[in-house]
Image: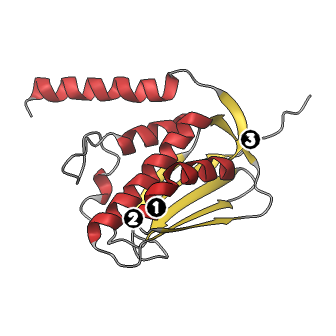
Amino acid sequence: MSSPTRERAAEIVDRIRAMATRGTVRQSEFELADIVKESMAFLQHEFDVQDVNVSLDLDNGLPMVAGDRTQLQQVLVNLLTNALQELTSSGIIQKRIGIRIELVDDKVVSCIIEDSGPGIDPEHLPHLFDSFFTTKESGMGLDLPIAQSIIESLGGRIWADNQSTLGGARFAFELPISLPETNH
């Protein structure tokens, strides 16, 4: 890609990321578990057709988080779809996705999505959240950078590694909990 083309592409990505994080934001408080369950329900037909076993593990008494429900659901659907695609294209017989939501400390909640697939090529790990980086023939390489922008706009962070308890890839993000307002 020539330098002017690369600069133009980077400008387009910056605009898409800005739209993803600044568009019509409907800020509200909600339980992260509810958004995860909605995202799972959205993809349930695909899980069934592809014979993927999906489990959800929740800590008790999880606090609320704040943000745009639709944007966060977009992140979750993208992460779950990526896991589903890796499982179905890899020839893995026992296709499993595990989702865990847990309290990290008194200020942060995490969501961990892991699969039983082949994992991520270690050479690809540092580039997963780079714009236009993809390992898929038909991918554009924008889902993960947009997911990162959304999570960061909510004050969180997102990462990926091969530390899955199921043997494959693990994607995780953390979000600050919504603290009750206090009057001073």
172 or 107: nearer the viewer: 172
At horizontal 83% and vertical 38% (from top left) the residue drawn is 180
Q: Say which quadrant the N terminus sits in.
A: top left
At horizontal 50% and vertical 21% (from top left) the residue drawn is 23
Q: What residue is shown with label 2? A: 50
Q: What residue is shown with label 3? A: 178
Counting residues from the start of the chain, the first of labels 3 and 1 encountered is 1
State the image quarter where residue 62 is shown.
Answer: bottom right
At horizontal 24% and vertical 62% (from top left) the residue drawn is 123
3 or 136: nearer the viewer: 136
Judge left or right: residue 177 versus residue 49: right
Judge left or right: residue 88 versus residue 49: left
Q: Secondary structure at mark 2?
A: loop
Q: What residue is shown with label 1? A: 47
Q: CA distance from mark 3 to mark 1?
A: 32 Å
Q: CA distance from mark 3 to mark 2?
A: 36 Å
179 or 71: nearer the viewer: 71
* Picture layout, residue 73 above or below residue 57: above
* Picture layout, residue 41 above or below residue 59: above
Amino acid type, mark 3: Ser
Q: CA distance from mark 1 to mark 2?
A: 5 Å
Query: Exactly how many numbered labels are in the figure?
Result: 3
Circle 2 residues within 10 Å: few <14, some 14–19, many ≥20: some
* Picture layout, residue 123 above or below residue 164: above
Of labels 3 and 2, the one closer to you: 2
Counting residues from the start of the chain, the first of labels 3 and 2 encountered is 2
Label 2 near label 1: C-beta < 8 Å? yes
Residue 173 is situated, as x and y percent measured from the top left of the image, at 53, 52
At horizontal 28% and vertical 69% (from top left) the residue drawn is 90
